Amino acid sequence: MGDAMLVLAFTLVGSAVQLPGVGGGSQVASFLAYTTVFRVEKEAAAAASVVMWLISFAACSLAGVPLLIHEGFSLGKLRQMAEHEKEAASENVNEQGESAQ
């Protein structure tokens, strides 16, 4: 159990590191945990890292997509909401910049 928690901790740190970037942080971190801490071969460590990511992604997707549909949302509507949020955030930044002058 402790070994699994250690891999999970590595994966969590990798996920936090990837947030500002493109992604892949959790896979790299779990790969490093498998290869450096547990001395697992690189091929097996890479496969385990990807499978762990797929399982966690699939679990979220399988639960999230039906809830998304049930709540009346669609991917297009979510994209539109994100655009409105970006516009509102940029307007707030502009207003704060003008009030500071």
Image (cartoon, helix red, strand yellow):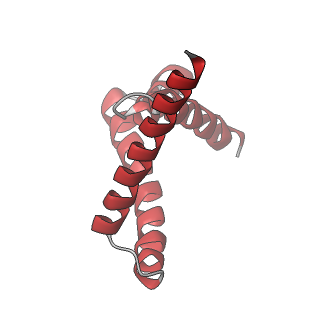
Q: Is residue 2 above or below residue 71?
A: above
Q: Is residue 81 above or below residue 18?
A: below
Tally of numbered discs: 0
Instruction: Identify which residue, 21 or 71, lies in the foreground.
Output: 71
Residue 54 at x, y = what percent?
38, 54
What residue is shown at x 40% (from left), y 44% (from top)? 86
Where is the C terminus found, in terms of image quarters?
A: top right
Q: Is residue 36 above or below residue 23?
A: above
User: Which quadrant holds residue 46?
Assistant: top left
Instruction: Identify which residue, 24 or 72, lies in the foreground.
Output: 72
In the image as oriented, which residue stretches furthest toward the top?
A: 101
Residue 38 at x, y = what percent?
54, 27
In the image as oriented, which residue stretches furthest toward the right?
A: 2
Instruction: Identify which residue, 20 or 41, lies in the foreground.
Output: 20
Residue 21 at x, y = what percent?
38, 28
What residue is shown at x 33% (from left), y 32% (from top)? 22
Instruction: Identify which residue, 29 or 3, lies in the foreground.
Output: 29
What residue is shown at x 28% (from left), y 66% (from top)? 76
Q: Is residue 29 left or right of residue 3?
A: left
Q: Is residue 71 above or below residue 44?
A: below
What residue is shown at x 40% (from left), y 63% (from top)? 58
Residue 87 at x, y = what percent?
38, 45
In the image as oriented, which residue stretches furthest toward the bottom?
A: 70
Q: Is residue 101 left or right of residue 64?
A: right
Q: Answer whether residue 34 is visible to the viewer in this image.
A: no
